[in-house]
Amino acid sequence: MAAVDHFLAMGGYARFVWPAYAVALIVMGGLLIESVLTYRKRRRALDAAEKRRR
Amino acid sequence: MLRLANPNRFMQWSGKLLPWCAVATAILLGAGLYLALFVAPPDYQQGESVRIMYVHVPAAWMATFVYAVMATASAVALIWRHPVADIAAREAAPLGAGFTLLCLVSGSLWGKPMWGTWWVWDARLTSVLVLFFLYLGYLALINAFDDPTRGARAGAILALVGVVNLPIIKFSVDWWNTLHQPASVFRLGGPTIAPSMLWPLLIMALGFTLFFVTLLLVRMRSALMAAKLRALRLQQAA
């Protein structure tokens, strides 16, 4: 437990280090989710449109 | 090269490449995160706060690299009127804006404990802020026209003009006095950073690069599918 606390404390810089990693997660995760959701939506719409045409 | 950029060809090869890119991104980012948080040593001056570097520096490199990609694609789109190049520039822009934002915020979080301030109006920080506004301006401009091809052309010209900012960012730390440290990796005479920190940094940077490539392919495929969908609807309406 002490080892975990020591790691999370980041030598006293926890309130700078962890927000930096959190912002990375939010920005990159957000871009990933938005890109993949748009892709799935378009894929479904295109498949449906091509099925109607046949 | 131009044959590979034909929309149908692009859909074929990008579809095959995409899973490999996604897996490589996951492995590199996982390994990079592990090395950055558990293996890399604390700095002898900065202590554990140096771990912000493994987010900040790759984000900064990507902010400028993605802009170079966007400007190159814009030049190709202007010269050869290639539709896939237009799509590449347009889809790279939000990713570049994201990396630039991440660079600014993580830099601020690193500046506070090390410099004693969240922000200074010096050449490096200001030129990166200008880069962020270039991305936002580009995105606003391409969507500001009723005719998408005119919007794309205006955006391409803005992207090319903005290229002058890239050398300013790179050399700002040498040309002007600043709190920001000078280059310690890409410099004449080789890196000055210790190998135990350089390797985690390079793996993280490679992970960021592949993350960008993967998302760019996904977004370009989405844009091409949207174009095909519009064409199909026009056909049905006719």
Image (spheres, coloured by chain):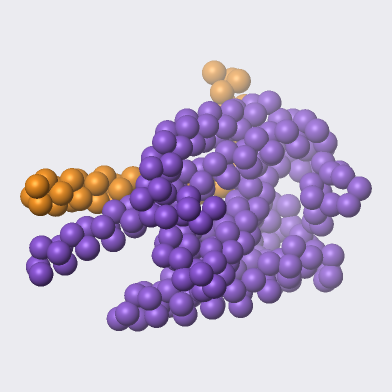
- Residue at left 58%, top 59%? B69
Colour of chain B, in one word, is purple
Q: Quadrant of the C terminus of chain B?
A: bottom left
- The extreme right residue here reads B189
**Is residue A26 something one can see in this rendering?**
no
- Residue A50 appears at what percent x and percent y? 15, 49
Q: Is residue A11 above or below residue B238?
A: above
- The extreme front residue here reads B3
Q: Is residue B135 above or below residue B65?
A: below
Q: Is residue B131 left or right of residue B188?
A: left
Q: Nearer the viewer, residue A3 or B176?
A: B176
**Is residue B213 something one can see in this rendering?**
yes
- Residue B218 appears at what percent x and percent y? 39, 47
- Residue at left 55%, top 34%? B29
Q: Which chain is orange?
A: A
- Residue at left 29%, top 54%? B225
Q: Quadrant of residue A2?
A: top right
